[in-house]
Amino acid sequence: LFKTSIFYLLIFTQFINSDVFAQSFTSRLVCSNNSLQNPWEITWGPDNFIWCTQRTGKIVSRINPTNGTIQNLVTISNVFTSTGQDGLLGLALHPNLLTTEPYVYLAYTYLFNAGGNELTRRRARIVRYTYNQNPSSPLLSNELILLDNLPASNDHNSGRLKITQDLKLLYTIGDQGKNQFGNKCDTIRSQYVDFLEGKILRINLDGTAPMDNPFACDCNSLRRYIFSLGHRNPQGIVQSSTGKIYSCEHGPKTDDECNLIVAGGNYGWPNVAGKKDGKYYRLGKWRDSTNCAGINFNDYVDPPPRRIERTFGDANFIQPIKTLFTVDTPYTFFTGSNAYLYWPTIAPSSIDIYETGPIAVFNNCLLVTSLKQGRLYRLQLDATGNSVVGDTATFCKSQNRYRDICFSADKTKIYIACDNTGQTSGPTQGSALNPVNPGNILEFSLLPEDLKKNIFFKESNFSKNTEFLQAVLGEKILQNE
Ligand SMILES: [Ca+2]
Ligand SMILES: [Ca+2]
Ligand SMILES: [Ca+2]
């Protein structure tokens, strides 16, 4: 009897893993492959078009979601992009775009010092363009620089831009990839309130600092722009209709995070990764090790001196509402080729909130796109919006790197933008998969049946390397083994 039960359990598990997803959503390509050059932000506009920034293309486009027609509204020659995470990044539309305030807000990196190194060559700026909606030749023009000289590097630039209900801009800036790879001998400044690295900024629409920002009393310093600190690489940010701000950020080998962002909150990096639980992560400062420049960076051996996270005592420290994912200590990381694909992190590239709509399985959920896994992660919020509850479920799987998400206005369709290559945009340039839909946008809509069954795998599966292999790379890789 025992053996029979196991047998049926296996059959059931295989059914869940292979078939249910395909029965739940149908997908369609919006454009043709490689018609976009690293689409980075997609936003559903009040004109019912998809507004898109092309990171390496330096182009802002308006895409007809029905027939895939791409209208280029402006090419910004001042954008600087080489290898890495630079280029044309965030976009936010003024809510009155089509009526009284025809403004589009953009963020991009520009060349500051051609002779500089990876931490000094570039800077970032936030600009405003004016939209001329002439039906025959719509265009963006009249660049107005709102905020200049923001930190930028080859790594962890973040760059998401969102406009809030109270008409402020939120802008995310990562830790610039310091203390790792080629930037290993530079100190992470996410905790330093006079630097804008590793921060979420809150900015008036004219580029000034709001007087009600948490550090606004110190009016002449950069800290007046800071809304929250202690971030690593927050590539996603969204505000709910009730005003709550959520952000997702890339962790180190463990502990990608989803955070509820509050004014003045300290999100811990680099002293804490994920929750302050002492699991796996500890801060090793390469700069403080002997002969930093002369030793090779190593992902697995933190240099001395090391700091354990329980020693971090900031009173404003706020733990994530969800980590993706945390492993127990000790934990043995896979170290073979393209090892990062097998780490417990998902590389969360954007976040959105599906509050209510016809896709019942997403009601009151945060949706996070994953670069590593070509999946959409569903994080179910509780009624207060302050906590994530239940198992993490994934949807919309494909062999691509998912960069950003938007919904149609009626919430029947989900759009996901895909990177052009399978390689990471970090300095390692690791490449492990050939994306099926490079430089394209996928449209997902729900088939009417099977709303309840499409949980693809459960978080409890994340316990061993072999299971990571299955979860991260899916059936295709398993067939190759
Ligand atoms: Ca978006
Ligand atoms: Ca954190
Ligand atoms: Ca931790």
Image (cartoon, rainbow, N blue to C red):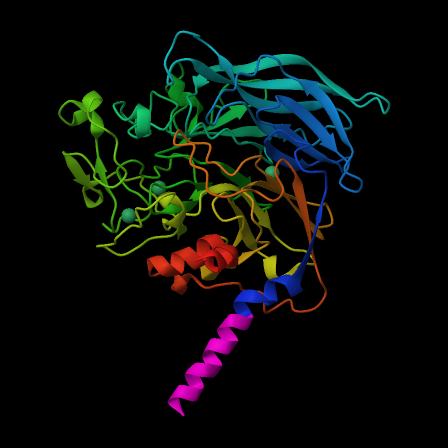
Above/below status of 97 relative to 353: above
Q: Position of residue 30 (x, y in %)?
A: 72, 42
Q: Which residues are magenta?
A: 1-15
Reply above or below: 419 against 19: above
Q: Quadrant of the N terminus?
A: bottom left
- The residue located at (48%, 36%) in the rendering is 423
* Quarter holding residue 59: top right
Q: Nearer the viewer, residue 381 or 288?
A: 288
- Answer with the quarter of the image where residue 63 lies: top right
Q: Residue at x 13, y 25 (%)?
A: 290
How far across and how far down the image is residue 478, in percent? Answer: 46, 59
Q: Residue 456 at x, y = what percent?
A: 53, 63
* Residue 306 in the image, given as x and y percentages of width and height: 16, 37
Residue 381, can we see it?
no
Task: Using the rendered image of the protein, determine whether residue 119 is visible from the camera's viewpoint.
Answer: yes
Q: Residue at x 65, y 38 (%)?
A: 440
Residue 10 falls within the magenta-colored stretch:
yes
Residue most toward the right? 136
Give the residue at x 46% y 36%. Answer: 424
Q: Main secondary structure of the magenta part?
A: helix
Residue 260 position by quadrant:
top left
Residue reaching furthest bottom?
1
Residue 119 lies within the magenta run:
no
